[in-house]
Amino acid sequence: MSKTKIVEKIFKIKLVNAQKMNKKYPATFQIPTKKKLKKITIGSIVKVCDEKERFWVIVKEKTSNQLVGKIDNNLISKSIYNRGDLIKFEEKHIYDIY
């Protein structure tokens, strides 16, 4: 009996660069420190933004420059992705860490 591997689609979506937002609005736009970003591991919950809304993502994979996470809340905006879908992102996209 052969084993079938189920491959989930990973969405590559346009996300807001939280680092740039912090540089533009340093007094009002807070982001995690570089030290806290480096401590993110599989299972961490982080917040990102797709220009329409901010949402929480559970980190499932991490490499030196990319992360893959599962969206952890229902999205209000109409998108092709929603709760439970996987997305690719980078540390620069992270607004907050839960």
Image: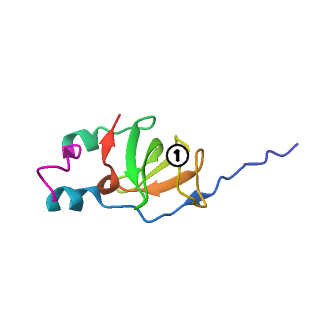
| x and y percentages locating residue 39 in the rendered image | 29, 37
Residue 31, magenta (yes or no): yes
Relative side of 86 to 88, left or right: right
Q: Residue furthest left?
A: 27
- Number of numbered tags placed on the structure image: 1
Q: Residue furthest bottom?
A: 14
| x and y percentages locating residue 44 in the rendered image | 40, 36
Q: Quadrant of the N terminus?
A: top right
Residue in front for this viewpoint, 78 or 87: 78
> What is the three-letter code of the residue carrying label 1?
Ile
Vertical order, 11 against 45 (above or below): below
Residue in front for this viewpoint, 2 or 23: 23
Q: Residue at x 27, y 43 (%)?
A: 38
Relative side of 66 to 28, left or right: right
Vertical order, 70 against 21 (above or below): above
Please provide the residue range marked out in magenta.
25-34
What residue is shown with label 1?
71
**The quarter of the displayed image where residue 19 is located:** bottom left
Q: Residue at x 20, y 41 (%)?
A: 35
Vertical order, 37 against 66 (above or below): above
Residue 46, magenta (yes or no): no
Q: Residue at x 72, y 49 (%)?
A: 6
| x and y percentages locating residue 14 in the rendered image | 43, 66
